[in-house]
Image: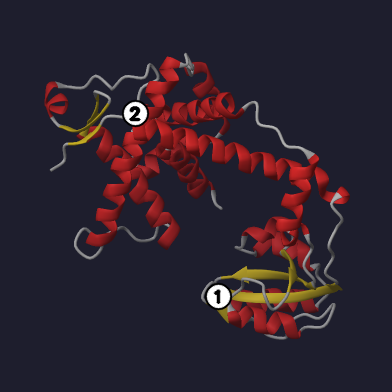
């Protein structure tokens, strides 16, 4: 995931489950904006401005997921998709208000210094300029993420898991902890056939595959020297790539670049790996952690559902 997608995803986490003001009340706006109210949650108003900013983020995220940001949603051609995003936006705005209201009751607050610390860790200025998002709104959504985390911890902090539960969970999800067999595969992905053949010539001349992957590959696996891990018939890879990869012998490199929808690949096979299933004791710690997380997530989901069922929600868009 590149930096831009990461930042959008980070923001979406907050948008889905949060509110718009750190004090738990709606933003004070101009007279024109105050007059345009599209919903209420327990008397707390949802403004058109809030809705539009939230929808802008969801559209941006959708465009990144679908087209890598190279294409924009078209108001006429993508009308159905946009309508679905609008409905999603309203539902999320409702949950925003509910969470902030409850956070206020629980005296959970987020300070500006906490947001300043996060803002310094990433190049948010460039991201905001590229996306056209308002910095003030963006900072508020970062507060939302921190609020969600604090509220989640408070609600689920006493969750416990015992050995008996963990053993049952392990047996139900044993494939999750098993290491799949297959042949270790690495690749280098580039945009053009000429680039691929130039790199292939270097590899045939004795250059190190991992070094060239780090230098030239456009796939995120470049950070691991192109390593994709073990590949087998069940691997979720495009057919053209998987068919060639599975025919390679350990140590063998493709004689020609392999073309797929992503570009041109140079594929190298490593050692064959047998499938392995560890015992419960060998993976007890990660099993306990996974089960505890699932229990926490379910508890918090039930908690949110209960809050929503009790809320007085008014949709004033129609």
**Front disc: 1 or 2:** 2
Front residue of this view, candidates 211 and 53: 53
Which quadrant of the figure has residue 40? top left
Residue occupying the point 32% across, 42% down = 91
- Residue 89 location in percent, x, y? 31, 43
Q: Which mark is residue 162?
A: none
Question: Counting other residues with Cα less than 10 Å from the Cα at mark 2, is it few (<14), some (14-19), or many (20 or more)?
Answer: many
Name the side, left or right, on which 23 lies relative to 51.
Answer: right
Residue identified by numbered label 2: 97
Front residue of this view, candidates 243 and 180: 180
- Residue 151 location in percent, x, y? 52, 26
Question: Counting other residues with Cα less than 10 Å from the Cα at mark 1, is it few (<14), some (14-19), or many (20 or more)?
Answer: few
Which quadrant of the figure has residue 197? bottom right
Find out whether the residues at labels 1 and 2 contact each other: C-beta distance under 8 Å: no
Residue occupying the point 75% across, 59% down = 174
Task: Confirm whether residue 212 shows in the render.
Answer: yes
Residue occupying the point 60% across, 82% down = 240
Q: Helix, strand or loop at disc 1? A: loop
> Real-space Cα distance between discs 1 and 2?
49 Å
- Residue 36 location in percent, x, y? 14, 31
Residue occupying the point 57% across, 31% down = 121
Position above or below: 30 against 209? above
Q: Helix, strand or loop at disc 2? A: helix
- Residue 163 location in percent, x, y? 80, 41
Position above or below: 102 against 66? above
Residue identified by numbered label 1: 192
Front residue of this view, candidates 180 and 134: 180
Name the side, left or right, on which 217 lies relative to 14.
Answer: right
Name the side, left or right, on which 208 lies relative to 149.
Answer: right
């Amino acid at each position: 995931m590149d930096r831009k997608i990461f930042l959008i995803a980070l923001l979406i986490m907050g948008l889905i489950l949060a509110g718009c003001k750190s004090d738990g009340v709606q933003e004070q706006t101009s007279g024109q904006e105050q007059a345009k109210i599209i919903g209420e949650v327990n008397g707390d108003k949802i403004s058109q401005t809030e809705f539009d900013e939230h929808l802008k983020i969801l559209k941006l995220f959708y465009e990144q997921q679908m087209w890598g940001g190279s294409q924009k949603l078209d108001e006429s051609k993508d009308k159905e998709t946009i309508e679905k995003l609008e409905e999603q936006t309203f539902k999320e705005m409702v949950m925003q208000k509910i969470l902030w209201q409850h956070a206020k009751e629980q005296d959970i607050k987020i300070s500006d210094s906490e947001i300043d610390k996060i803002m310094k860790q990433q190049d948010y200025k460039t991201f905001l300029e590229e996306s056209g998002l308002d910095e003030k709104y963006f900072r508020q959504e970062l507060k939302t993420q921190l609020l969600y985390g604090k509220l989640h911890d408070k609600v689920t902090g006493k969750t416990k898991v015992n050995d008996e539960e963990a053993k049952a969970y392990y047996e139900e999800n044993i494939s999750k902890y098993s290491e799949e067999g297959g042949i270790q595969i690495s690749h280098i992905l580039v945009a053009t056939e000429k680039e691929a053949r130039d790199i292939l010539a270097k590899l045939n001349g004795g250059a190190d595959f991992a070094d060239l992957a780090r230098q030239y590959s456009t796939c995120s696996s470049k950070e691991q020297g192109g390593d994709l891990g073990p590949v087998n018939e069940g691997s979720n890879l495009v057919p053209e790539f998987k068919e060639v990869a599975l025919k390679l012998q350990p140590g063998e490199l493709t004689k020609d670049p392999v073309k797929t929808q992503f570009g041109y690949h140079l594929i190298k096979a490593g050692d064959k790996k047998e499938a392995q299933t560890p015992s419960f004791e060998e993976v007890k710690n990660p099993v306990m952690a996974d089960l505890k997380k699932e229990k926490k997530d379910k508890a918090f989901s039930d908690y949110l559902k209960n809050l929503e069922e009790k809320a007085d929600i008014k949709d004033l868009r129609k």
